[in-house]
Image (tube, rainbow, N blue to C red):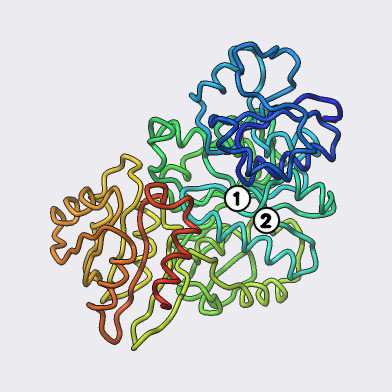
Amino acid sequence: MEVKDKKIIVFGLGVTGKSSIKALYELGAKISIYDDRKYEEYKNSITELEDYISEIIEDYSQLNWSEYYCVLKSPGIRLDNKFVVEANKKGVEVISDIELAYRIWGGDNFVAVTGTNGKTTTTSLISHILNYCGIKSKVVGNIGIGILYEILKNGLDTIYALEMSSFQLSNVEQFKPKIAVFTNITPDHTDWHGSFENYFDAKKNIYKNFKDEDTLVLNKDDKLLSKLKINANTKYFSLIEKADAYLDGDEIVIGNDTFNKNILNLVGKHNIANTLAALLAIQQFDLEFNKVIEAIKDFQSIEHRIEFVEEINGVKYYNDSKGTNIDSTKVALSGFENNVILIAGGYDKKVDFDELFEQVDNIKLLILFGDTKYKIHDAAVKMGVNNINIVDNLEKAVHISKENSSKGDTVLFSPACASWDMYDNYEQRGNHFKSLVRN
């Protein structure tokens, strides 16, 4: 499909929106922009884009909607947003940059990854292995910059590893990657989707248009994912039983090949699961297995995901700012045996925190801040955690962790919540934590 001379409204002017504007201009589209903020509030942020934009929409009540091909929506904008609802009512499609990229170029070079947790590591590992083995690959989607700009810049001889959030998948129509990975599913983002069922349905859109020849990688250990029945070439990974890729004692097994799990530079069993998923995703590229093992040895932990920050006076500090839900923080905690000082709290996504404290033997001290600090406190006390400090901000949390830690302890910053109460994103929050630890 060509977008030349098509009128497209870009809604949302963050990283995705801005990179999409540049790409669409190069492709010859006529670009209009809309934002929920007044123009005066965002005009300074788009000065470098002025030459690309044909129209700035401020009042859409008199808009001639029939002129427009689609609205290209930034992922975090809800489907019940008034502008989105009005576009749909007027018969104008509201789609994501992922959907538009598929319509323009197809998805034969797309490897897409979704799930509640493990997306970033699995996506990054897939791309790392491919690049290490001589196949050009780029990470796009929920990490990196927008896919439209990356494909325009790098071409179709590149394999695009897409990390896909439920937001991006919520309004899929035609999108179909060649390979899809579904790492796991637990409740998250119910504030955005309205229910766990809606959240799960959005995630399942990753294989919505699959055919028998398309490859779907699923977690056999996940009760919900293991029950899915899909018309696809389905492959399973497991930490507890035999599968297409599985853990057998200390050995990772895939087909007739094995290697020891201790070559991984990643903390926790969940990262073994992520590695198994990545191995199945790259199978069809027929890579030399020894090179794949070298690539895995070479792969380092992702920034903000159980990222080692510093060891100070025998105390190790880990940044897990990407731990934005309960399950992610549980997984992070499971990677450490004892004497963990856990710093948690943040934006309230309307979830119950009792489950976070089902296994609490390794928590030495709990330090809470953010919108959810009292909600997490009450859940922790109910589940038997009593050594708790409540503070106003991350600065005080890190200060208290330093005052109360001793040699051999681990300070784990894993919020179990999104960052939006105090920070623009989890990256900003994680970088703040690292600077506080080091200063």
Q: Residue at x 50, y 31 (%)?
A: 78
The reply to whether dot 2 and dot 1 touch (C-beta < 8 Å) is yes
Q: Is residue 261 above or below residue 21?
A: below
Q: Residues within 10 Å of mark 1 (few under 14, many from 20)?
A: many
Q: Is residue 399 above or below residue 59?
A: below
Q: Which residue is mark 1?
A: 163
Query: Can residue 415 be seen from the camera position used here?
Result: yes
User: Is residue 390 rendered to the left or right of residue 25?
Assistant: left
Say which quadrant the N terminus sits in.
top right
Question: Which numbered marker is on residue 229?
Answer: none
Residue denoted by label 2: 139
Q: Is residue 83 above or below residue 275?
A: above
Residue 292 figure quarter:
bottom right
Number of numbered discs visible in the structure rendering: 2
Q: Amino acid at mark 1?
A: Glu
Q: Tell whether 343 sits left or right of 307.
A: left
Q: Quadrant of residue 174?
A: top right
At 20% from the left and 50% from the top, the residue drawn is 374
Where disc 2 sits, the SS reads: strand
